[in-house]
Image: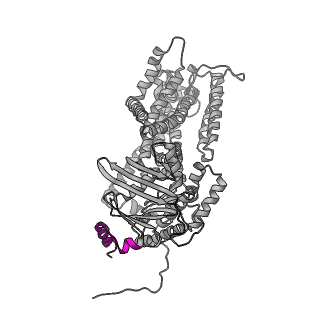
Amino acid sequence: MEETLTRETQTPARARPRGSRDPIGWARANLFNGWFNSLLTILILALLVWIVPPFIRWAISDAVFGAATPDECKAASGACWAVVTEKYRLILFGRYPFEEQWRPLFGIVALVGMALLSCDRRFWGWQLLVIWALGLGIFFVLMGGGVLGLSPVRTNLWGGLPLTLMLAFIGIAAAFPIAILLALGRRSKLPIISALSVGYIELIRGVPLITLLFMGSFMLPLFMPTGVDIDAILRAQVAIIMFAAAYLAEVIRGGLQALPKGQHEAAAALGLGYWQTQGLIILPQALKITIPPIVNTFIGLFKDTSLVAIVSLTDLVLATRQALGDPEWRQFFIEAYLFIMVIYWVFCFFMSKYSQHLERSLATDRRS
Amino acid sequence: MAHATANAEAGRSDEIMVDLQRVNKWYGDFHVLKDVSLTVRRGERIVVCGPSGSGKSTLIRCINRLEEHQQGRILVENIELTNDVKNIEMIRREVGMVFQSFNLFPHLTVLENCTLAPLWVRKMPQREAAAVAMKFLERVRIPEQAEKYPGQLSGGQQQRVAIARSLCMMPQVMLFDEPTSALDPEMIKEVLDVMVELAHEGMTMICVTHEMGFAKSVADNVVFMDQGEIVEMAPPAEFFTNPRSDRTKAFLSQILAH
């Protein structure tokens, strides 16, 4: 039997039904649907009850805050935050002359301000160069002194957070363009360019950063003519840049390869040259899709700066260790390390959040 | 062109726009183009058809050097295609191309897609480039979409933007590589309508397409390719009613069978 169907009037669109929003319904749907999920929920709750209250007791209720003597800390059963109050200037600024420590403080402000301004897409152009020239200029004048009536401070006294931030920010800013060139080079049709890029990437990526830092510190001076001395911080900075560039190049190459061939062809068919095609068509898309792994690399680089301690540069971690050299306070190392953990975490979490924001604001594939 | 009429002869001149002389191409050892010769005059409309793998796409992609040929000569406006990059870019400025998969730039708005090449290749001022772009977006009937991104448009709209983007470079020749093959059936007409208008305005066109209705209504000559060679070339009236080669007859019976 054949059936036919005709509908004379158009069905109007109806509002989507709202799911139940009460807490019990939500918990049943999300926490207790099935015996396995219920078991997991109970186990995790038990774990939280087991861990969180003792931690809060240690970190807050029973803790010693503010200025206190080591003996007062030893008497208390909780955390000794007095170690941070006592040593924070050593931790943050290392062996920088005590009287002059307002200078690294404003140096940090200059670097962070520079980084924050760079996050604003309205400045992505020549303004970025101005921002960085100003930010780094202010930073180096403040830190090094010798001009504007500031007493000179040699780089072997630089340390703590300003050193960490400097190594990380300059590392990121310099490695990024180098990585783009390496990624393009590796895909180049010119055999020499592509061989050089492959060679560089595979060589640098294949060794640990620590060995690069060692080579820069101990081997490079052997090859330099006598009397020529490159600053230790500069050598470490260059090693970090070279290392990060090799890693980042492969991340960016992944993005370049993800683009369909048609994009190159359309650009070519319109008469765009190589650099125009890369700069206007390919890189904007490739970099956009690689934001998550690029930021991943940046976060890794930020934390890898702590490896410079191996060549005796007093970054935030080494400065903390030196601050704990005081036998009176040595036993409260957990509190001191928690303090710098929070500092590292704040910067890395900001990078992560910013990358998510950037991804959303650059999305063009949503229907609006 | 002075007389933009439906008359196929009207826009034609004797000036040779594209000249292929015994062009040969291989992919590895596979001989894809075999001694292909074709002369296209200013204002002429050529439709290239043939079974898949016959080399028709490869042929038109050789004209703007998206593919390199190994033997023979290709001249566009009397400039020979060589390995010289400047030469290639000069020719690409004069040759527009529309792809099967549109290939719009997804990170740019429709307007930016259209102004990009005039700005950077023709060095046109921003204001003028935008005006030219709006003119052609109106021509393809989607000026209201100028600020949208390609991902927000339908396939038919995207292909019309792609045509406008090409036209913004004021090309002397337009190449179409199966422009309607990736479209849903209800969108094919809106693209073909734009192409028919373009033909009537006197644009020199080389179209690889299976749209035989389009071939019948606007082509000056239909080229049938098979196995990398041009088997037959004739005006549509003759091509469709009185094909000479057996291969053409077999092909036509297949595509006109339904």
Camera-side residue: B257 or A351?
B257
Residue B257 colored magenta?
A: yes
Query: Does residue A231 belong to the magenta stretch?
Result: no
| In the depicted structure, whether residue A326 falls above or below residue B228 | above
Residue A222 locus on image (x, y percent): 46, 14
Relative to the observer, which residue lies in front, B138 or B75?
A: B75
Residue extent of the magenta highlight: B237-258
Q: What residue sits 60% from the left and 59% below the top?
A: B133
Quadrant for residue A31, please give it.
bottom left
x then y, percent, for residue A40 = 34, 53
Foreground residue among A342 and B176: B176
| Count of marks, rendered view | 0
Q: Is residue A58 visible?
A: no
- The residue closer to the viewer here, B242 or A33, is B242
Q: In which quadrant will I find the C terminus of chain A? A: bottom right
For the N terminus of chain A, give its image quadrant.
bottom left
